[in-house]
Amino acid sequence: MHFQNVSPEPRCFSSTLVCLPATAQTVESGPGANGLTVKRVTYGVGQRFRLEKPKQWVEESERGERNVFAEEKRDSTAVTLYDAGRNLRLRLDLQRPQVMLVEGSKLSPLYDIVSFSTSASPTATVTTNIPSRYLGDWATDDGACRVSASVLTISASGIRFGATTLAFVSGTETDSEFRMKANAQAAEQGKAASGRDVLLAVLDGGLRFLSAVGGKETERRAFVRCEKADLQSSQVSTNPPAKSDAPKVIAYGNRKGMVVDIVSATGLNSSAAIITVRHTRNNAKTFCLEFRSDKSEKCIDETMREVKVPEKIVANCVTGELSTLLGDHVVFHGRNPKASPTNFNEPGFIIKRGNSVLAEAAVSGYDMAIEQFTALCPDRVRAR
């Protein structure tokens, strides 16, 4: 039984309720929540695991579908559940944070955890606008804050991203998330599109955004808050000096903390744009703290040994060709004319690997490609 299909490259398991991509990120819990105290774990828009009574959990959707699990054990970071009827064992891992399929000693990620709380049935407060803790400007990473078209702006009355506006209609807030009904509208068309169900969850230093139409998830993004200095630089119309356009660090992977230092940047916006990078011990420490929640020197040493990235990324800003830090070769073709608030399956920019257009998702490599191309060719990305 499946509730939804959310990604061009999902991991699907017929024994569970949903197909979702497994891309680990750190999630901010409700007050006092950990593996020993958690009573509710949410994923997707409207799906959750909930402690129904002592030692019994249910997996359920807002449409009333449910599976029953027995609680086998808990520790400070996770809860292990078992469905005897299907011989299915799951681990609600709050540290990764993912729901894991347990097969003997093997753990396989099924889907991402959005939030978790000590309240099994949280009190939902009806709001007349979007709560203040979600307001502000957000982007997929610090570097994207410099590209105005990539910034998600949340005000009390709605959400704006590029040419799309999600106007607030109604909302409810709990301790760990905010759900709202919204109407989508494209600024250039001035037409109201189909209604949206939107979920916002406070993350560790950022925001998780999910959107659904008719119960089917259409958009899933993680954002970081933009600093004012970055936003001001995104509005500059003249060409800035080469080094000012490049962030101090740049991502080499799609997990939190996977960054390398930028050593130098030459020829930006040209046919031979080059950024040289170096993976440092401080980068390894950032990954261990932000993704693994591990402060040990052992984690830092292991990361230094395991991470091997090229010394530079190169782009031809005229043809759009890019060689990424993962050794991938893609071509940037500009803005996607098919992207609209009624078609979330279309990426905002067309980036091709061979003859295939990358889906706008971390698992496809799209997010890293657009960040690295933006650092090398900012004028090409800003062009309308």
Image: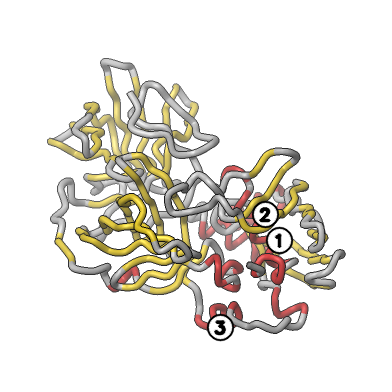
Residue 261 shows in the view: no
Q: Amino acid at mark 3?
A: Gln
Picture quadrant of residue 257: bottom right
Picture quadrant of residue 113: top left
Q: Nearer the viewer, residue 50 or 143?
A: 143
302 vs 130: above or below: above
Picture quadrant of residue 85: top left
Task: Kindly identify the residue that appears in the image at 25 percent across and 61 percent down.
Answer: 31
Per the image, the residue denoted by label 3 is: 232
Residue 183 lies, in percent from the top left, at: 31, 57
Gap between marks 1 and 3, in whole Å?
Answer: 20 Å
Task: Kindly identify the residue that appears in the image at 32 percent across and 51 percent down.
Answer: 196
In the rendered image, the quadrant that contains the N terminus is top left
124 vs 227: above or below: above
Q: Amino acid at mark 2?
A: Ala
Per the image, the residue denoted by label 1 is: 373
Q: Give the color scheme: rainbow, by chain, secondary structure or one colour.
A: secondary structure
Name the residue at the right extreme: 272
Gap between marks 2 and 3, in whole Å?
Answer: 23 Å
Per the image, the residue denoted by label 2 is: 369
Residue 368 lies, in percent from the top left, at: 64, 54
161 left or right of 321 in image:
left
Task: Name the N-terminal-most of marks 2 and 3.
Answer: 3
Q: Nearer the viewer, residue 223 or 87?
A: 223
377 left or right of 131 in image:
right
Task: Kindly identify the residue that appears in the image at 24 percent across and 31 percent down.
Answer: 71
Give residue 227's mark. Answer: none
Q: Amino acid at mark 1?
A: Phe
